[in-house]
């Protein structure tokens, strides 16, 4: 007897908004100008996609997130694998009961041979499971709607090429235009950036009160034009430049990257900061010059130093090169008083 499965979906208006498929856009990545309007697709456009099906050696398997024999489950540590298998069987048993009135004991040794509907190779069933997404959020209610429960597990497993399993995954992989927003996880991802930014701003405030020299060196190190900042630069200018930098409105447009760079720089000693800034300034002033062979040379002595700025810093740290370091510090001190 053929199994008949009927899905009755709730409208978005009555669904819980704790789990949502939302459009993802990166304002720094060009998308036909839509990024300027916080849009992923043109108004009124929707994309519909079915669950991804993989075929290997003539065997078809859908990426459902409900297959205890999938590679992702097999590679889990023993305890995690056992817990995941138990979870999958409980969900599959629930769905079989709701969709096909098929009662299966999760501990039955013949469990998968008794699954009728949500088997990962059931073409007739899975090819009809799809998501339809646009600029408006799509609300899922997996606790009440079996269809939404299927979508949830498939998205988490990467079963839809359009929808990332999380906001973090969408940020890491530029292919996604949508992401699964499970409120708790998404808030954690968003607050992660806020926390790192606030930490950087706290350090900035402390430096303003206690160490102008370090703040000067950090500003010179992180801003594009380091030579514009000298000993006479007002501390309020330094504060403002780094405040804009940390919030993503300076040389680095990603607030998270900028904050991490600022915090990393603040952990360096003033001596190490000064040496890095010295090299940066003297490269800008052509005291160190890069020639056609790719090497950086010291202008006055003709010394062949390195192929990178980092290499120049290490070169100057070597006691054998103290005379060149002394000359470089004199040049740097002169630039800092200009």
Image (cartoon, helix red, strand yellow):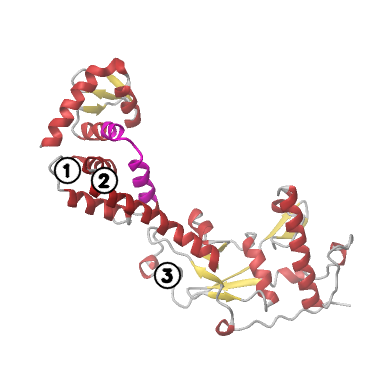
Image coordinates of residue 49 in percent, x first then y, are: 61, 68
Nearer the N terminus, badge 2 or badge 3? 3
Query: Of circles 2 and 3, which is in front?
Result: 2
Quarter of the figure with residue 305: top left
At x 85%, y 69%, the residue is: 104
Q: Is residue 43 magenta?
A: no
Quarter in which the C terminus is drawn: top left
Task: For mark 3, give the secondary structure.
Answer: loop
Give the CA separation, mark 2 to mark 3: 31 Å
Residue position for label 2 = 223
Mark 3 — residue?
39
Asked if 307 appears above or below 95 in the picture, the reply is: above
Q: Which residue is mark 1?
A: 228
Q: Along the line of sight, which residue is nearer the eye, 106 or 232? A: 232
Image mark count: 3
Q: Is residue 292 above or below residue 204?
A: above
The answer to whether residue 68 is left or right of residue 181 is: right
Find the distance from the CA under tag 1 to the CA under tag 3. 39 Å
From the viewer's perspective, tell me whether residue 182 is left or right of residue 124.
left
Q: Are marks 1 and 2 in contact (CB under 8 Å)?
A: yes
Q: Is residue 48 left or right of residue 111?
A: left
Q: Which residue corresponds to the image point at 50% horizontal and 61% vertical from the top-left?
A: 188
Residue at screen point 39% across, 50% down: 257
| First in residue order: circle 1 vs circle 3 | 3
Chain part drawn in magenta: 257-276
């Amino acid at each position: 007897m053929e199994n008949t499965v009927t899905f009755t979906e709730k409208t978005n208006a009555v669904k819980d908004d704790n789990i949502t498929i939302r459009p993802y856009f990166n304002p720094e990545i060009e998308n036909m100008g839509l990024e300027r309007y916080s849009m992923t697709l043109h108004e009124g456009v929707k994309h519909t996609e079915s669950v991804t099906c993989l075929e290997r050696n003539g065997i078809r398997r859908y990426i459902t997130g409900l297959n205890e024999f999938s590679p992702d489950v097999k590679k889990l540590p023993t305890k995690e694998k056992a817990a995941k298998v138990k979870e999958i069987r409980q969900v599959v048993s629930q769905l079989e009961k709701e969709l096909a009135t098929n009662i299966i004991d999760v501990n039955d040794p013949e469990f998968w041979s008794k699954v009728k509907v949500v088997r990962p190779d059931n073409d007739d069933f899975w090819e009809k499971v799809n998501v339809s997404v646009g600029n408006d959020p799509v609300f899922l209610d997996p606790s009440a709607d079996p269809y939404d429960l299927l979508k949830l597990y498939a998205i988490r497993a990467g079963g839809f090429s359009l929808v990332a399993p999380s906001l973090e995954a969408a940020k890491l992989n530029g292919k996604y235009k949508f992401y699964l927003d499970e409120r708790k996880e998404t808030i954690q991802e968003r607050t992660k950036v806020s926390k790192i930014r606030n930490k950087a701003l706290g350090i900035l405030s402390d430096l303003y009160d206690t160490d102008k020299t370090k703040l000067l060196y950090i500003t010179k190190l992180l801003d594009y034009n380091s030579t514009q900042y000298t000993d006479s630069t007002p501390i309020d200018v330094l504060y403002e430049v780094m405040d804009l930098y940390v919030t993503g409105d300076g040389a680095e447009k990603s607030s998270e990257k900028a904050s991490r760079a600022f915090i990393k720089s603040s952990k360096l000693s003033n001596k190490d900061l000064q040496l890095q800034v010295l090299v940066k300034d003297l490269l800008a002033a052509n005291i160190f010059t890069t020639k056609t062979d790719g090497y950086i040379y010291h202008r006055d002595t003709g010394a062949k130093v390195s192929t990178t700025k980092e290499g120049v810093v290490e070169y100057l740290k070597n006691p054998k090169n103290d005379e060149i370091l002394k000359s470089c510090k004199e040049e740097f001190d002169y630039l800092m008083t200009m």
